[in-house]
Image (cartoon, coloured by chain):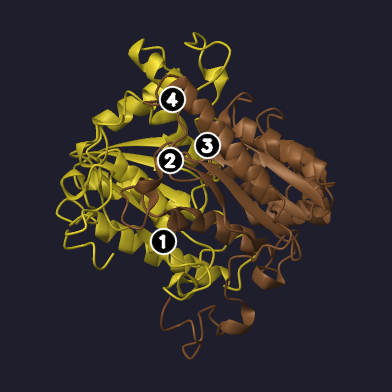
Chain colours: A yellow, B brown
Amino acid sequence: MNVLIVFCHPEPRSFNGAMKEIAVQSLERLGHRVEVSDLYAERFDPVEGPTHYAERVEPNTFFPLTEQRHAFECTALPADVKREIARLERADLVILQFPLWWHGLPAMLKGWFDRVMVYGGLYSGSMRYDRGHLAGKRAICSVTTGSPATAFTRHGRGGDMATLMWPTHCSLYYLGMEVLAPQVVYGVQGGGLSYQAESEFREHLECAKQAWAERLTRLEDARPIPFSGWRDWDEHGVLQSEHPLAWRV
Amino acid sequence: MNVLIVFCHPEPRSFNGAMKEIAVQSLERLGHRVEVSDLYAERFDPVEGPTHYAERVEPNTFFPLTEQRHAFECTALPADVKREIARLERADLVILQFPLWWHGLPAMLKGWFDRVMVYGGLYSGSMRYDRGHLAGKRAICSVTTGSPATAFTRHGRGGDMATLMWPTHCSLYYLGMEVLAPQVVYGVQGGGLSYQAESEFREHLECAKQAWAERLTRLEDARPIPFSGWRDWDEHGVLQSEHPLAWRV
């Protein structure tokens, strides 16, 4: 497999950095080719806006999707976006490695979606979900949280993890990818904030690395999260009322 | 009331820009003081990272929360973060005006949370949720979506809107704010992508502006979204099993 790891953390010596490193080592040992998009190290610009489009279709009003489509068609996309698309095209498996910040992706990684997943190139009205451009590829989120696991259970105060992951999982599926259940490490606190002693922190990290390395051996055969698709929907994109899922979702 | 509108769109002449403008006008006409954080116009930097901290507690390893707390305590936070905090402190009502991009906040607005809501200043382990620093203030999201409303119903392919808004609503509540039901305008497409003719687009906009202006007259008495709080949770932050909500959430 070709694997793309999109790594989003400002500190290479972080828990997230260690998770990225063990993934590179483990996957290479298994014979896969690994490429890393290190968004902070590459100073990726997460802000979609007019500055990225020199030749505008609409010089007076900036419509992001219009300019994305036009730039894609003219092969005039910004160099960093082209690079990220090329990496995606090469990948069989995409791993997003990030800390949960404010109940979601860090801005840097959110902007990777905003800018790289260009309209008219990576998706369109007819090219999305199970007819998506990235069909045949798999994706998995590897996430760390500050709060402990209990806070993210069904009745936990942080909201259950499945709900917090839904927007990102939905975006990955929108692009056509199969989404695997996330790898989540809870209760990661560093830099003297922790109630955990340094040795406990190290132990937590070693444990997490081992679990991740072990899981990475099993991703090829893993069953993806089931999503409904075009044949399940009516013309409004709503689950058909007689669909077996409709009574219980 | 003092109202802060956090406006996040790269184009002032956009649907979102018009929604921001009508809010300013309507609120001022009602006698409120309005301040706007125009994130794109002010070139807000949404990327949390070591570049924002000149005097580091930990010069060798960047722990975001550690540096946030330290900078807050030394009043050494970056100028833009200080400005946004001052705006928040002045506000009785906070309006977030943004387009739904990739099932969530645009990176620019996500980074406003990542950078401005500093640990040790705007929240801590004991200062959050209904004991949050911003208690007594109210917040509301005013959102536009590209897809039509049906796609965001309970069985819609985009996922239901309540789920997509949950991470942001949870973040606002985490800070102590009361969260009002969002103002959502569906099916906003511009720049020649639209199946809607220009006149239909204008009509859609006028309709949305009117509804928003009307709703803004009623926000002071509006009932916020109910959340569970400290007295509902056990020591792990989980809804107490005998709590009346536990059986049905």
Whether tag 4 and tag 2 are in contact, CB under 8 A, the answer is no
Instruction: Judge if badges 4 and 3 mark residues of a common chain.
Output: yes
Mark 1 crowd level (few <14, some 14–19, many ≥20, 10 Å Cα): some
Real-space CA distance between mark 2 and mark 1, rounded to the nearest whole angstrom: 15 Å
Q: Quadrant of residue A86?
A: top left
Q: CA distance from mark 1 to mark 4?
A: 27 Å
* Residue for badge 2: B102
Q: Give the amino acid type for the residue marked by disc 1 in the picture.
A: Thr
* Residue pointed to by mark 3: A40
Q: Amino acid at mark 3?
A: Tyr
Mark 4 to mark 2 CA distance (whole Å): 12 Å
Q: Which residue is denoted by mark 4 in the rendering?
A: A65
Which image quadrant: the C terminus of chain A?
bottom left
Which chain letter matches label 1? A
Q: CA distance from mark 3 to mark 1?
A: 27 Å
Q: Amino acid at mark 2?
A: Trp
Side of B228 relative to A30 (left or right): right
Residue B102 at x, y = what percent? 43, 40
Name the residue: 27% across, 36% down: A128
Answer with mark 1 or mark 4, whichever residue precedes in sequence: 4
Q: Can residue B8 be seen here?
A: yes
Question: Residue A173: image x %, image y %?
Answer: 29, 45
Point 38% across, 62% down: residue: A162
Vertical relation: A98 (above or below) A207 = above
Chain identifier of the residue bearing label 4 in the image: A
Local packing at callout 4 (Cα closer than 10 Å; few below 14, some 14-19, many 20+) is some
Q: CA distance from mark 4 to mark 3?
A: 25 Å
Q: Position of residue A141 (x, y in %)?
A: 36, 51
Q: Is residue B160 above or below residue B17?
A: below
